[in-house]
Image (tube, grey):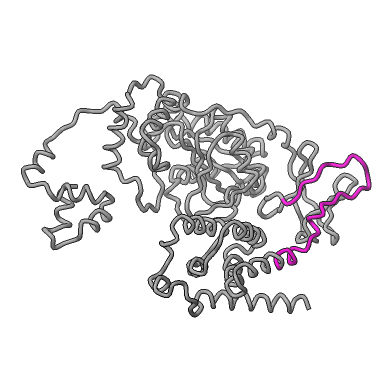
């Protein structure tokens, strides 16, 4: 590291100290310190051999904690360590000293494209991914087998869930339940790609999660970690596991019936996948799990609500009056689902209606005990276009017509499916905060915008308004100038959309 810094600096002819710090991912003070060392001091630095520290064997886990939660202090890090290793005898002072030195040598805030792999931390991570294999002979018929692979990152212990049909949210949750019961415990977090079963939408790493799966994860007690898009290396173990299941367990096999497929897969897990000598760890996954990882896993009990809702989801056609039929009664859904199909399931005394594409809940009713009744939610029949128009008018009233139309247009461009909710959020913010023109202009310069981001900007402006003032604004003392290109662009978009909406109405 010292020689790298010296070479990059090149006695003042190379990079600046700040540029070197950015290039190597270290602090500017560290660069300055090493540049001040002469050759004799460098030799002494290299010849120095520190004795092993008691926390060295837990270094990977400490780095993981600090990368995920950079503001954790040493005392809390030590407390988390002692929860995993009660026998650990390290003082707060030693922990503070060790972690302080670790922060100097490890880059905790770096621009990464791939998440760190926690090979050396037992009980923390399980990687999950799905796959399918076409053309498998089952009862003499070419069949597509759908499956989901679960791999514990530390031990490589594996479980495979199997399905006759494409995996939906219900079967995905059931597979998790079966996997954790197979492991006899659950990890702290599960890692996924951005499949609709987990993440419905991402905007600048703002994730809109599948609500039903998120509810299960919360009840079961594990975190959902969604990889960035097109980032297979973040869950490389399970990517390899999917290929292993296809090529080693299923490819080239034929089965008498579905029961034979399930039996074969369970035997393969028990007799092959989990007892082989793994190429990376050099150990059997089952033996490594039982010896080093099981004790670090969390307790798992199947959530009570899950046992009450094991009945498969059914589908219903919505009629032109936004009603569906269920057990001799009719129940309302939002008007935008007229003449389409929706998912329906019973949970105790509740009827849950969901969007078949996203699996999001769109309506919930108490089940009627009578017959021939119509159970309506009046919110389902409100004109959403009128609600949107009302919000847009209120926002324009507060910000001015041009600025209000432009801001609404940017929100609609960013989140068209939840535009009404975004408008409601912006209206609520404008009742709490003043939004000056300089802040409106700054917001409109963004390529995309959500109400949550507007809230963050408003809070930042309230704390330090001087940061948002341009030199021209300071010199003009707030004098009104020509509208910015961004303001005019989005105002034009809003005007065009308003004209199109009026044409549709007439």
Q: Where is residue 299 in the image (x, y as percent from the top left)?
A: 55, 26
Q: Position of residue 129 (x, y in %)?
A: 53, 45
**Quadrant of residue 367 in the image?**
top right
Q: How many marks?
A: 0
State left or right for residue 328 relative to residue 49: right
Tell me, yes or no, whether the highlighted magenta stretch contains residue 387: yes
Tell me, yes or no, whether the highlighted magenta stretch contains residue 444: no
Residues in magenta, as a range: 362-389
State left or right for residue 1 relative to residue 39: right
The structure residue drawn at horizontal position 85% and vertical position 60%, both measured from the top left corner, is: 321
Q: Where is residue 357 in the image (x, y as percent from the top left)?
A: 67, 55
Q: Which of 71 and 55 is in front in this view?
A: 71
Q: Where is residue 365 in the image (x, y as percent from the top left)?
A: 80, 45
Looking at the image, residue 136 lies above or below residue 217: below
**Quadrant of residue 100 in the image?**
top left
Q: Nearer the viewer, residue 83 or 345?
A: 83
Looking at the image, residue 70 lies above or below residue 414: above
* Quadrant showing the C terminus: bottom right
Residue furthest toward the top?
A: 87
**Quadrant of residue 504 in the image?**
bottom right
Q: Nearer the viewer, residue 132 or 471?
A: 471
Residue furthest toward the front?
A: 477
């Amino acid at each position: 590291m010292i020689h790298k810094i010296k070479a990059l600096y090149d006695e003042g002819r190379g990079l600046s100290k700040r540029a070197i710090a950015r290039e190597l991912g270290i602090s500017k003070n560290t660069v300055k310190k090493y540049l001040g060392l002469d050759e004799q001091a460098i030799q002494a630095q290299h010849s120095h051999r520190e004795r092993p520290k008691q926390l060295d064997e837990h270094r990977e886990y400490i780095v993981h904690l600090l990368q995920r939660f950079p503001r954790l202090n040493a005392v809390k890090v030590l407390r988390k360590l002692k929860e995993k290793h009660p026998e650990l005898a390290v003082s707060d002072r030693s922990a503070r000293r060790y972690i302080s030195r670790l922060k100097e040598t490890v880059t905790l805030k770096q621009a990464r494209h791939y998440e760190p792999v926690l090979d050396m931390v037992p009980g923390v991570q399980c990687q999950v991914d799905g796959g399918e294999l076409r053309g498998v002979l089952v009862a003499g018929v070419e069949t597509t087998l759908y499956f989901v692979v679960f791999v514990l990152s530390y031990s490589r212990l594996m479980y495979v869930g199997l399905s006759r049909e494409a995996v939906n949210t219900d079967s995905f949750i059931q597979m998790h339940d079966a996997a954790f019961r197979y492991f006899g415990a659950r990890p702290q977090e599960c890692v996924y790609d951005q499949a609709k079963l987990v993440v419905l939408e991402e905007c600048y790493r703002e994730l809109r999660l599948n609500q039903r799966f998120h509810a299960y994860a919360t009840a079961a007690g594990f975190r959902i970690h969604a990889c960035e898009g097109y980032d297979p290396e973040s869950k490389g173990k399970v990517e390899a596991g999917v290929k292993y299941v296809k090529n080693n367990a299923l490819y080239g096999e034929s089965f008498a019936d579905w029961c034979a497929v399930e039996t074969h897969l369970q035997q393969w897990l028990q007799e092959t996948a989990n007892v082989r000598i793994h190429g990376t760890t050099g150990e059997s996954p089952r033996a490594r799990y039982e010896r080093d990882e099981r004790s670090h896993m969390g307790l798992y009990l199947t959530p009570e609500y899950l046992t009450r809702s094991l009945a498969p989801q059914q589908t219903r056609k919505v009629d032109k009056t936004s009603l569906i039929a269920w057990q001799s009664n009719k129940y309302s859904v939002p008007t935008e689902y007229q003449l389409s199909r929706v998912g329906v399931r019973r949970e105790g005394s509740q009827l849950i209606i969901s969007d078949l594409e996203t699996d999001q809940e769109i309506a919930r009713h108490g089940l009627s005990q009578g017959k021939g009744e119509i159970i309506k939610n009046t919110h389902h029949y409100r004109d959403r276009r009128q609600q949107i128009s009302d919000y847009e008018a209120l926002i324009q009233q507060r910000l001015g017509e041009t600025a209000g139309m432009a801001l609404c247009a940017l929100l609609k461009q960013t989140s068209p499916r939840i535009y009404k909710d975004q408008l409601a959020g912006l209206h609520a913010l404008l009742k709490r905060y003043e939004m000056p023109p300089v802040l409106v202009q700054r917001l409109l310069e963004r390529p995309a915008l959500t109400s949550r981001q507007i809230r963050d900007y408003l809070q930042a402006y309230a704390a330090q308004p001087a940061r948002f003032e341009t030199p021209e604004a300071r010199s003009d003392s707030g004098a009104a100038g020509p509208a910015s290109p961004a303001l005019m662009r989005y105002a034009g978009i809003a005007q065009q959309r308003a004209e199109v909406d009026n044409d549709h109405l007439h």
